[in-house]
Image (cartoon, rainbow, N blue to C red):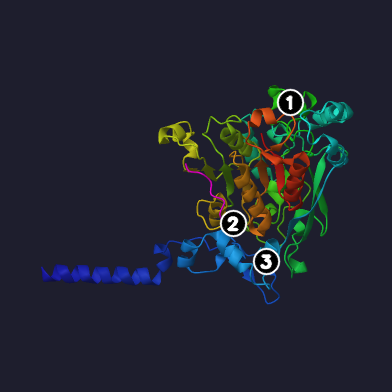
């Protein structure tokens, strides 16, 4: 019995010795962590990168982050005059990318803004409609193939896979034209972007020459003008007939910016003519990027005062190849859980967050949807926001907050907002929800303010 014990002891000892001398056979090899290395000049050397965070929100203890909402923390940080409020410059130090430079109103938008003044207190626009009929008809013709479609073909998901494989943006994606030929600058307003050093200092040796782009190269993206009743042009031309009041085929969503802004180009698309060697840089420069959707006035998935907007946004995001990874849905009207969740497609349940209580616009409240957004968003994420919960003074507070904090206006990509003001033809549908002290020019001013901050703001239905 003892000899057998000694035999097994010797065998176990030999096995352990073999393991020690050849440890790699028994070691699980994990992928190297993603790391950002910054040299003494501050330039980023891209081996691979961690998911970045906003500098103003990344500091602080865990207890502080739990007890103090993000907006309040940002407000406190703004009290220091030395604080650099340019979030892009602070977040992307040492990196090259596409940056918003300016918003340019089209001649149509500028002329209408002037000519509408005498009609602001009137309930109809017959003389103005006659004066702008030809331009409105031209706008409708040129919008074909460029605006977000009302009916989405789910076969576009295959095109999204193809885009990722080929590293290009397909012109037929989502049944839209990709600015070829460009739309009329007389009719459509424009966003101008420039390829720059996002945050000094940048090392010339790290310039992403593999993209085919040049330093200070510009790109123009188009958007529907702020015109008429801030809805489908047919609502204006047909004196507010209900057929087009809920029609969404006038809003131009910018797929290019969703895929290229800041450093997004590093993990998504390349120019078709670009050389696909990485010039020594790391191609995979970020871990998984999210696509966030925040809906203030969400109703339910297949229902709502303006139609099934949740479904429209989900389908449209998929159509533009930015399917939502996180959905934050706020609705004040009480619903039983089965009513809210029973109609949501199963595949969305992992991404779907339902908040069935009224929106709070206070900076100090965790029930402010913007605090929820800031607690989840990262700079490279794509962000879509819809605001339409029919409480005009709270909606205005939400908009003012977005305009105040660069962590919001330099991060939100597409914003959809139904601004309830004194507006011809729409008063019959809003039934007293609107702010009678504001008019159409005031509404244009609000959307221009958002657009001049870099947000592609659309007047919602």
Q: Against 437, is 101 above or below?
A: below
Query: Main SS type for the magenta part?
Result: loop
Q: Is residue 292 magenta?
A: no
Q: Position of residue 161 (x, y in %)?
A: 62, 40
Q: Position of residue 432 (x, y in %)?
A: 63, 34
Circle 2 sits on which residue?
378
Q: Which residues are magenta?
A: 356-362
Secondary structure type for disc 2 = loop
Q: Earlier in the sequence, mark 3 or mark 1?
A: 3
Q: Against 131, is 453 above or below?
A: below
Residue at (67%, 37%) from the top-left corner? Answer: 460
Circle 1 sits on which residue?
240
Q: Against 233, is 104 above or below?
A: below
Tell me if 125 is positioned left or right of 47 in this view. right
What's the distance in space between the residues labelled 1 and 2, CA to CA?
41 Å
Secondary structure type for disc 3 = helix
**Label ID, residue 365:** none
Q: Earlier in the sequence, mark 2 or mark 3?
A: 3
Q: Nearer the viewer, mark 3 or mark 1?
A: 1
Circle 3 sits on which residue?
90
Tell me if 345 is positioned left or right of 268 in this view. left
Secondary structure type for disc 1 = loop
When asked about the image quadrant of residue 107, the answer is top right
For label 2, the crowd category at 10 Å Cα-Cα, with few meaning under 14, some 14 to 19 and many 20 or more, is: many
Nearest the viewer among 316 and 362 is: 362
Q: Position of residue 279 (x, y in %)?
A: 72, 61
Nearest the viewer among 259 and 69 is: 69
């Amino acid at each position: 019995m003892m000899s057998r014990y000694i035999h097994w002891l010797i065998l176990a000892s030999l096995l352990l010795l073999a393991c020690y001398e050849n440890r790699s056979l028994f070691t699980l090899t994990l992928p190297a962590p993603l790391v950002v290395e910054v040299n003494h000049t501050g330039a980023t050397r891209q081996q691979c990168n961690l998911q970045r965070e906003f500098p103003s929100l990344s500091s602080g203890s865990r207890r502080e982050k739990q007890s103090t909402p993000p907006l309040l923390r940002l407000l406190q940080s703004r009290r220091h005059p030395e604080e650099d409020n340019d979030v892009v410059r602070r977040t992307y130090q040492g990196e090259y990318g596409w940056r918003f430079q300016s918003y340019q109103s089209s001649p149509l938008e500028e002329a209408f803004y002037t000519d509408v003044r005498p009609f602001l207190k009137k309930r109809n626009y017959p003389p103005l409609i006659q004066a702008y009929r030809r331009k409105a008809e031209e706008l409708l013709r040129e919008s074909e193939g460029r605006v977000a479609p009302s009916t989405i073909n789910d076969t576009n998901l295959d095109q999204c896979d193809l885009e990722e494989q080929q590293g290009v943006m397909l012109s037929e994606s989502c049944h839209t034209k990709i600015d070829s030929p460009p739309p009329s600058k007389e009719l459509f307003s424009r966003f101008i972007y420039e390829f720059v050093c996002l945050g000094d200092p940048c090392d010339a040796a790290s310039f992403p020459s593999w993209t085919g782009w040049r330093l200070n190269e510009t790109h123009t993206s188009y958007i529907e003008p702020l015109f008429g009743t801030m809805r489908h042009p047919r609502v204006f031309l047909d004196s507010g007939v209900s057929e087009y009041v809920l029609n969404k085929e006038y809003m131009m969503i910018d797929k290019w910016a969703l895929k290229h802004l800041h450093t997004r180009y590093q993990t998504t698309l390349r120019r078709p003519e670009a050389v696909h060697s990485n010039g020594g840089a790391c191609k995979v420069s970020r871990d998984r990027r999210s696509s966030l959707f925040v809906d203030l006035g969400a109703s339910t998935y297949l229902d709502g005062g303006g139609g099934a907007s949740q479904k429209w946004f989900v389908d449209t995001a998929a159509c533009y190849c930015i399917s939502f990874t996180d959905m934050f849905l706020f609705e004040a009207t009480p619903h039983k859980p089965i009513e809210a969740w029973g109609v949501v497609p199963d595949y969305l349940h992992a991404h779907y967050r339902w908040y069935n209580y009224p929106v709070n616009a206070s900076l100090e409240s965790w029930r402010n949807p913007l605090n929820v957004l800031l607690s989840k968003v990262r700079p490279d994420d794509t962000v879509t926001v819809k605001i339409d919960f029919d409480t005009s003074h709270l909606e205005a507070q939400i908009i003012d907050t977005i305009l105040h904090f660069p962590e919001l206006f330099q991060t939100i990509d597409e914003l959809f907002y139904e601004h309830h003001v004194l507006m011809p033809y729409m008063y019959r549908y809003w039934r007293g929800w609107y702010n009678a002290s504001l008019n159409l020019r005031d509404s244009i001013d609000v959307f221009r303010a958002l657009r001049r901050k870099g947000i592609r703001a659309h007047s919602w239905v």
